[in-house]
Amino acid sequence: MKTSAKAKRLQRHQRRGKSQGKLNLVSLMDIFTILVFFLMVNSSSDVQVLNQDNSVKLPVSNADKVPKNALALAVTAEDILVGGRAILKVDQLNAFEGDVEPQLKAELDYQSSKSNVAPSPLGLPIIILADRELPYELLKKIMSTCVDSGYASISLAVNKPEQKEV
């Protein structure tokens, strides 16, 4: 017996409905790979966020040059922190007679040995976060120790002055 055109069309339609669609994973993998590379390249931004203690009041400056990504040395009221870790008490550094403090130098030497930054002729970069009321003699000892450890490219963290609207 001969089937009608309508019956043939219904059979084709039913066969099409039984087979499941397949997903092309190759093109999805390409898209995700490009997305991952894009995010990796754009994840390194030009802004460096320094963890600042509220007790440290940075000086105000109109400097426009942004420092490179560098090791952060913070001087609080009680401690000297290198990379967020307390290394030395401020009172110990005040009492130290000399320019290069051995405990701070040992920590800076350790940090420079594990740093993956290629040393430049200007020395390794370091950012010092210090209160604007910090005595110069204390800052001089810190900077001398930094230079002796190979951190000769010293930047001081500052706040930008607030813009007054006219």
Image (tube, rainbow, N blue to C red):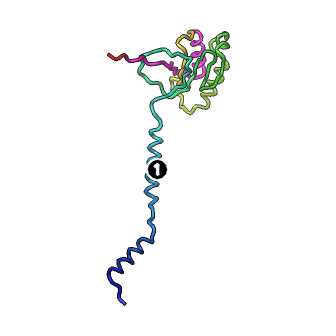
In this rendering, the answer to whether 141 lies above or below 9 is above
The image quadrant of residue 76 is: top right
The image quadrant of residue 51 is: top right
Q: In the image, residue 116 lies at what x, y percent? A: 56, 33
* Residue placed under numbered mark 1 in the picture: 33
The image quadrant of residue 105 is: top right
Tell me the quarter of the image containing the C terminus. Answer: top left
Q: In the orientation shown, which residue stands out farthest toward the bottom?
A: 1
Comparing 19 with 78, the one in front is 19
Query: Is-magenta flag for residue 134?
Result: no
> Residue placed at 43% from the left, 18% from the top?
160
Q: In the image, residue 39 lies at what x, y percent? A: 46, 42
Comparing 43 with 150, the one in front is 43
On screen, residue 106 versus residue 1, left or right, reads right
Crowd tier of the residue under label 1, counting other residues whose Cα lies within 10 Å: few below 14, some 14–19, many 20 or above: few
Comparing 74 with 23, the one in front is 23
Q: Which amino acid, mark 1?
A: Thr
On screen, residue 116 versus residue 7, left or right, reads right
> Residue placed at 56% from the left, 21% from the top?
53
Q: In the image, residue 145 lies at what x, y percent? A: 60, 17
Query: Is-magenta flag for residue 160?
Result: yes
> How many numbered tags mark residues here?
1
> Residue placed at 44% from the left, 39% from the top?
42
Tell me the quarter of the image containing the N terminus. Answer: bottom left
Q: Helix or strand or loop: what does disc 1 sit on?
A: helix
The span picked out in magenta is 136-163
